[in-house]
Image (cartoon, rainbow, N blue to C red):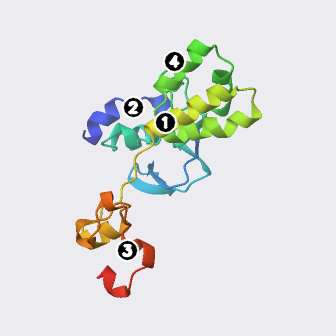
Amino acid sequence: MNRSALRGSITDDDRTFVETWENIASYQNVIIRLDTRGDERQEVINGRRTFMLTAEERIITQDRIVDPAHDPFRNGSFRPVVVPDTISIETNPNAMSDDDILNIFKASDLAFGEWLKTIDSPQTLRRMADLAPDSDITMRRYKAIEARFREVKPQTRLEVKDEQLKNFLSDKPGASDGASPAGGQQNPRRRQGGRSSDYR
């Protein structure tokens, strides 16, 4: 989308309203700032930092993000502190304040379950787990939060192209080791340790 088309969707209120957000993720995120001439520049927001920007700058930043899953304003990386009424947990279930989370803890079992289904941000679910000990949440609900976190957490996979190294890292003996699972033998390199030549 070009800048002129975007400008048409931004109101005077967006240009003047100053929002406050907190980067609750442990990693950095980037936002777009507008200088006094209206030129754009990028700013790195480090983890655990509270920052302010105009609603216009937030809209422009979100417009530049290709995959909505990577939008820190919607995926729970940024926690809203002071935001317009248009941003709420109804429109964005991942953008919850601590008070919003505590209110969900007090909801009925049916409402709690429905909320949990709509939250798909690992960061938000981790915050819920962190706030749970200071609330009256039941162990069953705490376990449901942890289960949902495991469900939405991206899987970390190690890609190994070297077949010898892959066999070494594997718990299953490789055919090149001369051992079969039926024989009950372990990968000898795992048992004995390897020489430096094993990793070439």
Determine the CA span between mark 4 and mark 2. 33 Å
Residue that label 1 marks: 55
Q: Residues within 10 Å of mark 4 (few under 14, many from 20)?
A: few
Of residues 81 and 191, which is closer to you in this image?
191
Of residues 101 and 62, which is closer to you in this image?
101
Residue that label 2 marks: 10
Foreground tag (3 vs 1): 3
Query: For the residue labelled by badge 4, is the local secondary structure a helix, a strand or a loop?
Result: helix
Q: Residues within 10 Å of mark 2 (few under 14, many from 20)?
A: some
Foreground tag (3 vs 4): 3
Residue that label 4 marks: 114
- Mark 4 vs mark 1: which is more N-terminal? 1
Q: Residues within 10 Å of mark 3 (few under 14, many from 20)?
A: some
Place of residue 186 in the rendered image (x, y in percent of width and height, measured from the top left): 38, 67
- Quadrant where the N terminus is found in the figure: top left
Query: For the residue labelled by badge 3, is the local secondary structure a helix, a strand or a loop?
Result: helix
- Amino acid on which the number 2 mark rests in the picture: Ile
Which residue corresponds to the image point at 38% horizontal and 61% vertical from the top-left?
171
Determine the CA span between mark 4 and mark 1. 30 Å
Place of residue 14 in the rendered image (x, y in percent of width and height, measured from the top left): 47, 32
- Can residue 192 be seen here? yes
Which residue corresponds to the image point at 48% horizontal and 57% vertical from the top-left?
44
Which residue corresponds to the image point at 33% horizontal and 80% vertical from the top-left?
199
How many labels sit on residues?
Answer: 4
Disc 3 and disc 1 in contact, CB within 8 angstroms: no
- Quadrant where the C terminus is found in the figure: bottom left
In the picture, the disc for residue 188 is 3
Of residues 59 and 174, which is closer to you in this image?
174
Determine the CA span between mark 3 and mark 2. 65 Å
